[in-house]
Image (spheres, rainbow, N blue to C red):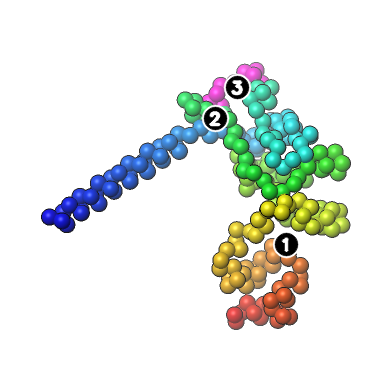
């Protein structure tokens, strides 16, 4: 009798859990997503970055919201140049959303300094967007791109030049097993290590022992 009751409780619990998961999965699936192709706008239409991101030339803070609003979109989406139908850009017309706020950034970045003072182009930092359907955070500039200029010749390579004291500079790959597994990656991705570490950094722990020799046997 007890076994049967326990089995029923487990079955009911399982049904409840599945129902909750289905409910929230349906909500997530129906959430409005902005439909936007950088590739289409840049390559096919010939739009310039500042046509949509009009606040960039005056932006001095990495946390400025430089995403386009409806006002910028309607300059072209006027039913003459491009469609003004909501479904052109919104996936859920019952509950359309605006572009979400971006995560708080723990670094300094001044667009005015880079664009006006250094006469840089958007594509100097934002590379490959003409091939991207929908730009996400992973499409932003990488440290390797920053170091093309921040090399202690053109610009300072000091971390404090861009990163706030609260910044977590450790990459995601440097997890709790990093002390053990880094030897394998150091052999095949040596240049990636050099993005942050000097050539003599390994000697702080390896005391002059050749890195590749350590990687083979330890």
Residue under the image location 73 percent in, 52 percent down = 163
Given this view, does label 3 or label 1 mark the residue nearer the observer? Answer: 1
Image position of 124 with respect to 59: above or below = below
Numbered label attached to residue 196: 1
Q: Nearer the viewer, residue 166 or 103?
A: 166
Question: Residue 177 location in percent, x, y?
Answer: 56, 68
Res. 156 visible in picture: yes
Image position of 143 with respect to 31: above or below = below
- Span colored in magenta: 78-88
Numbered label attached to residue 97: 2
Numbered label attached to residue 83: 3
Residue under the image location 73 percent in, 65 percent down = 197
**Separation of marks 3 and 1 at Cα, in angstroms:** 47 Å
Question: Residue 200 location in percent, x, y?
Answer: 76, 72
At mark 1, the secondary structure is: loop
Q: Identify the mark nearer the N-term, 2 or 3.
A: 3
Q: Quadrant of residue 205?
A: bottom right
| Image quarter (top left, top right, bottom left or bottom right) of the N terminus | bottom left
Query: How many C-alpha atoms fall within 10 Å of the one at disc 3: few (<14), some, or many (≥20)?
Result: some
Q: Identify the mark nearer the N-term, 3 or 1.
A: 3
Going by the picture, which residue comes out furthest to the left?
A: 1
Query: How many C-alpha atoms fall within 10 Å of the one at disc 1: few (<14), some, or many (≥20)?
Result: some
| Image quarter (top left, top right, bottom left or bottom right) of the C terminus | bottom right
Query: How many C-alpha atoms fall within 10 Å of the one at disc 2: few (<14), some, or many (≥20)?
Result: some
Question: Residue 141 location in percent, x, y?
Answer: 70, 48
Question: Residue 149 location in percent, x, y?
Answer: 81, 53
Image position of 123 with respect to 206: above or below = above
At mark 3, the secondary structure is: loop
Taking the image as shown, residue 161 lies to the left or right of residue 177, namely right
Q: Identify the mark nearer the N-term, 2 or 1.
A: 2
Numbered label attached to residue 182: none
């Amino acid at each position: 009798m007890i076994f049967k009751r326990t089995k029923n409780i487990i079955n009911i619990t399982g049904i409840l859990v599945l129902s909750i998961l289905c409910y929230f999965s349906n909500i997530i699936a129906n959430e409005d997503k902005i439909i936007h192709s950088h590739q289409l706008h840049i390559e096919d239409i010939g739009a310039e970055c500042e046509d949509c991101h009009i606040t960039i030339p005056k932006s001095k803070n990495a946390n400025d919201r430089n995403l386009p609003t409806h006002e910028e979109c309607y300059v072209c989406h006027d039913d003459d140049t491009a469609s003004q139908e909501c479904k052109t850009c919104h996936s859920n017309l019952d509950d359309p959303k605006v572009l979400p706020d971006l995560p708080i950034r723990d670094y300094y970045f001044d667009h005015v300094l880079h664009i006006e003072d250094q006469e840089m182009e958007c594509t100097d930092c934002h590379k490959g967007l003409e091939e991207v359907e929908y730009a996400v955070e992973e499409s932003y500039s990488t440290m390797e791109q920053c170091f093309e200029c921040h090399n202690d010749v053109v610009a300072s390579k000091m971390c404090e030049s861009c990163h706030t004291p609260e910044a977590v500079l450790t990459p995601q790959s440097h997890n709790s097993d990093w002390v053990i597994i880094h030897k394998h990656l150091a052999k095949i991705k040596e240049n990636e290590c050099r993005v942050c570490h000097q050539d003599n950094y390994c000697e702080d722990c390896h005391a002059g022992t050749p890195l590749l020799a350590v990687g083979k046997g330890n």
